[in-house]
Image: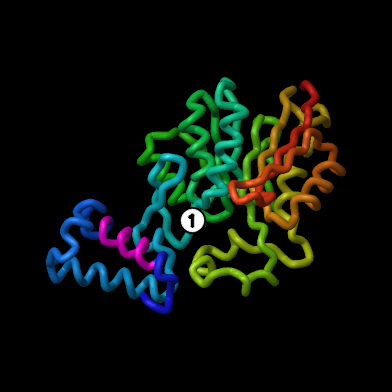
């Protein structure tokens, strides 16, 4: 893999492949570095290395990743969950862990990482996860089944949100939507471009497309009385592009959202935002 990855990364990737594919733990790998392996195991490792050289993400090669204490199945139909998304989940949990009977919706669920982490840590909550990709939802449903978590999954597009998904059914709206402008494509590593592009990119002319659509969904009047229904405070949590925190904050403010908070990630970048809107009682 020399020439394809930095030396330190090569070592980490090799250890990950060997420990997973050959079921050898790190201690055994250190103590028995010269241990011979079978021809079949050698073929497995060589095939995996070939995929790495082709810039396939190691998580896709292994078929899983770890997220907030969960092992999740992933493949090329879903984004690989990032540490920043774990930080978003952690923020939500710190503010709502003790709340009971929350109604939560995860918009753009992908592997189900946000929805499943919230359901697992707030068991009394009712969690809905939507995605416009049936293939992504199949992965999310599998992960929910393996973890024994009861989450409602809906195949829907937030840009064409059907009336059957009613905004007043939810107290918390969480989302890590597409937010990378197409013009930024060439700035991304090759392995990232192996992930589903529709979950990454937005048009250059409208980089806030999904944030606006989700905010409009929250603001949409209920059919019952023409107001935002439900009588409970609606809280939105977004993962965001570090360069668009100000623009998103201004948009949310102009739409009537209050208590807008921009939060930095562990690297000091503006990567999360939250806000709320008080719902009128039905």
For the record, the magenta segment spans 10-19
Query: Any magenta on residue 34?
Result: no
Which x, y percent locates residue 62? Answer: 34, 59
Per the image, label 1 sits on a secondary structure element best described as loop
Residue lying at 62% horizontally and 71% vertically, measured from the top left: 187
Corner quadrant of residue 282? top right
- Expressed as whole percent of the image width and height from the top left, the position of residue 102 reads 59, 26
Q: Is residue 50 left or right of residue 35?
A: right
Q: Residue at x 87, y 43 (%)?
A: 254
Dominant SS in magenta: helix
Please tell me which residue is depicted at 82% across the width and 48% down the height of the picture. 251
Closer to the camera in the image, 277 or 191: 191
User: Is 217 positioned to the left or the right of 156 in the image?
Assistant: right
Is 147 placed above or below 188 here?
above
Residue 135 or 89: which is nearer the viewer? 89
Residue 162 in view here: no
Report the residue marked by disc 1: 80
171 is higher (above) or lower (below) than 47: above
In the image as oriented, which residue stretches furthest toward the right?
254
| Residue 41 position by quadrant | bottom left
Q: Residue drawn at (56%, 31%), measured in percent from left and top?
A: 93
């Amino acid at each position: 893999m020399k020439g394809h990855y930095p030396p330190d990364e090569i070592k980490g990737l090799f250890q990950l492949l060997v420990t997973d594919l050959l079921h050898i733990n790190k201690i055994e790998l250190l103590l028995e570095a010269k241990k011979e392996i079978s021809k079949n195991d050698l073929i497995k490792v060589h095939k995996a290395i070939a995929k790495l050289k082709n810039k396939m993400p190691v998580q896709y090669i292994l078929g899983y990743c770890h997220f907030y204490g969960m092992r999740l199945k992933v493949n090329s139909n879903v984004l690989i969950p990032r540490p920043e998304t774990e930080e978003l989940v952690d923020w939500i949990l710190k503010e709502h862990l003790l709340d009971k009977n929350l109604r939560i919706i995860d918009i753009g669920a992908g592997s189900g990482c946000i929805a499943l982490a919230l359901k697992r840590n707030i068991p009394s909550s009712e969690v809905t996860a939507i995605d416009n990709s049936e293939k992504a939802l199949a992965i999310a449903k599998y992960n929910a089944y393996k973890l024994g978590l009861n989450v409602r999954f809906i195949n829907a597009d937030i840009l064409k949100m059907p009336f059957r998904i009613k905004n007043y059914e939810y107290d918390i709206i969480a989302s890590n939507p597409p937010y990378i402008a197409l013009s930024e494509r060439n700035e991304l590593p090759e392995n990232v471009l192996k992930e589903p592009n529709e979950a990454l990119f937005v048009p250059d002319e409208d980089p806030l497309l999904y944030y606006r659509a989700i905010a409009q969904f929250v603001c949409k009047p209920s059919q019952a009385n023409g107001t935002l229904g439900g009588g409970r405070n609606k809280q939105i949590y977004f993962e965001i592009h570090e360069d668009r925190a100000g623009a998103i904050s201004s948009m949310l403010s102009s739409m009537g959202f209050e208590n807008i908070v921009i939060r930095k990630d562990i690297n000091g970048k503006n990567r999360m935002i939250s806000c709320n809107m008080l719902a009128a009682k039905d």
